[in-house]
Structure formats: C-alpha cells, structure tokens
Image (spheres, helix red, strand yellow):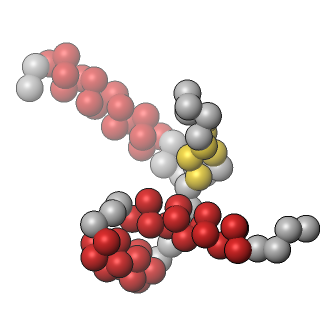
Amino acid sequence: MSNDTKQFVEQIAAEADATADQPMPATSTRPNKSVTVATRMSPEDLHAIHAPATALDVPISALVRGWVLARLSARPSP
C-alpha cells in the first residue's frame, strides 16, 4: 500500500472514529430522488430476515423494502 493510500485510509478511519457516537441522519437524498432510510435491529431479527432473503435470492434490503411497501399498499386510504 502506498503512503498516500495508507494516509487516506488512516484519515477516513480517524473521521469515522471521531463521529462514531453521533446519530446517523434519518435520510439522505440520491440523484434519482430515492431516499435511504436507516434502521437498527437486533442480530436475532436480522438473522430471521436473512433466511427468507437467501431463499428468495434477494438482498435483505430489497426484501425489507418489499415488506414495507406491501404493508403500506394494504392500508385503507385515510
């Protein structure tokens, strides 16, 4: 690893360590106007989601997004 690369990695690691205790932003915007939503869950819950995602051969995030959107579409209109 070159010195420049090593210094860059060390700088990024230091920034990550300095902000580790700060809350994550709720959302961030993307150029295609989709929004990222961060959530925390227990390792047990993540493990429970991993099995059906693997069986369906989809990423966990895609499975969770599908569940959320299906639940929202099943709600009665206000």
Residue drawn at the location 76% of the way across and 73% of the way down: 75
- For residue 43, say whether it is visible: no
Query: Who's the residue at 70% across and 74% down the image?
Result: 74
Residue 33 sits in which quadrant?
top right
Q: How far across and down, in percent of the image, does residue 25 sit?
A: 62, 45
Residue occupying the far left of the picture: 1
Q: As displayed, is residue 37 above or below residue 35? A: below
Residue at image position (56%, 31%) is: 32
Quarter containing the N terminus: top left
Q: What x and y, as percent, mark residue 30?
A: 56, 33
Q: Position of residue 39 (x, y in %)?
A: 56, 62
What residue is drawn where x is 40% and y is 77%?
49
User: Which x, y percent locates residue 50?
Assistant: 34, 74
Quarter of the image where one finds residue 28: top right
Instruction: For the C terminus, give its image quadrant.
Output: bottom right
Residue in front for this viewpoint, 15 or 71: 71
Q: Quadrant of residue 7?
A: top left
- In the image, 8: left or right of 31? left
Compared across the picture, whether 70 is left or right of 10 comes to: right
Closest to the observer, 77 or 11: 77
